[in-house]
Image (cartoon, grey):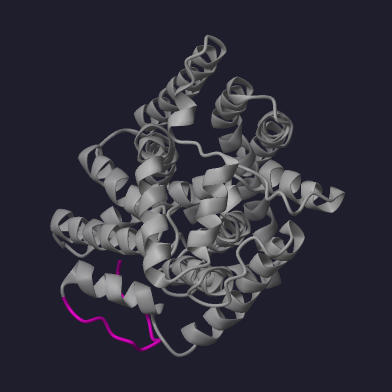
Amino acid sequence: MFTGEPRGRAGSSTQTSGRRIAAVDALRGFALLGIVVVNITYLASGYRMAGLATPSFSAPLDWEVRWVVSLFFENKFYLLFAFLFGYSFTLQLDSAHASATAFVPRFLRRLGGLFLLGLAHGILLFPGDILATYAVVGLVLLAVRRITPRTAMVSAVALTVALAVGMLLLALLATLGTDASRAVSENAAQAAMSDRALHGSASMIINEHLHKLARIFVLRVFFQGPTVLAACLVGLALGKMRLLGDLSGHTATLRRLQWAGFTVGLAGAVVYTHATWSGGGHAYHMVGQSVNLVTAPLLAAAYAATLLRLLPAAPRLAGALVPPGRVALTNYLGQSLISSLIFTGYGMSLVDQLSPFSVVSIGIAIFTVQAVWSRWWLSRHRYGPVEWLLRWFTNWRRPSRSPARPERA
């Protein structure tokens, strides 16, 4: 996800100057928009972090916003990030091969840097951090880097189906009176305590984040980690096929992804959203999660296919999405920092004080500002601030700051 890319094929309509592939950067920028819309709802509410709706906001518009976010955004955009992480892994392999550079030590340092950033992010700003998960999954990608595209796709599907079956088993256990999901869920009283902690001092906020990290560790190991791995394997497979280097020969495939995603994928999202907000109990919630595991990747793929088909005919859209995508790591962490300054005791302490509509509007505003800032920054610098630090750690030498022709990943 957070890398530079080699040059696409000559004549590709999705290519920028230098070695970057515009389609990859645009997809990253698009994913950032979806990520902030979802993450800010958790950063703004201790109740949402507990899987509950904030009691003080129960007007029809509040519920409509919650449903829209769950239906169209939740569990779709982090899959795009994971897909791009796997795709960019193949580009890094190509870059190392072309430059006759030892790949494994450099990639291990990159993963170490991502893990440290993720650990700091999760403790200081947002327990829902994804970077540490990428770092661990990256070790798996490194181990299977010679896998064939077919085997990678089959493995991704098998892993997804296994996770979905596991969720159905949890639903069955819940109906029998053994509800394993309660081990990582919280009630309204605990959510209220979380609110008070997030309004407090820096030490109280950090302690609350550590508490959340401890509770969701099981979900990370048995749910999010394997889900991210499956999406990364798809990215690895398509990266080996050089799909995003030249999209001109894949229009039919993109259409099929749109049809599947906007029918089956969207239907599954309806089930997931209803199970999340209808109050149907833990068993029904697990069923919704199971359906979501299978169908969310289809809807995410439909989003990506639609954007990829639009890019050649919409240069302004590409111009808006590519810059934030090029500095995705800085923007991802920046979203959490800005949101924390707005909603927690680090700054304005507005946690659970703003309606869902206001919260989502702020998220969209944050991305808009980041898109403008990213264009300005890249006109003066080669990398984003955090990308520059990670590259230094990865290559074990200080990168250039010049906005001239970028180095290899």
**What residue do we see at 55% from left, 57% from top?**
195
Number of residue marks = 0
* Quadrant showing the C terminus: bottom left
**Residue 257 spot, x, y in % from top left:** 64, 37
Q: Nearer the viewer, residue 143 or 361?
A: 361
When asked about the image quadrant of residue 215, the answer is: top left
**Residue 321 spot, x, y in % from top left:** 60, 68
- Whether residue 17 is visible here, answered yes or no, is yes
**What residue do we see at 36% from left, 74% from top?**
386
Q: Residue lying at the far right in this picture: please name it.
A: 60
The magenta stretch is 397-409
* Quadrant showing the N terminus: bottom left
When asked about the image quadrant of residue 96, the answer is: bottom left
**Residue 362 spot, x, y in % from top left:** 68, 69
Q: Nearer the viewer, residue 257 or 180?
A: 180
Q: Nearer the viewer, residue 165 or 63?
A: 63
Q: Is residue 25 left or right of 115 when viewed as pictured?
A: right
- Whether residue 5 is visible here, answered yes or no, is no
Q: Nearer the viewer, residue 241 or 92?
A: 92
Q: Main secondary structure of the magenta part?
A: loop
Q: Is residue 97 above or below residue 304?
A: below
**Residue 354 spot, x, y in % from top left:** 71, 64
Q: Is residue 344 above or below residue 177?
A: below
Q: Is residue 263 magenta?
A: no
Q: Is residue 197 above or below residue 85?
A: below
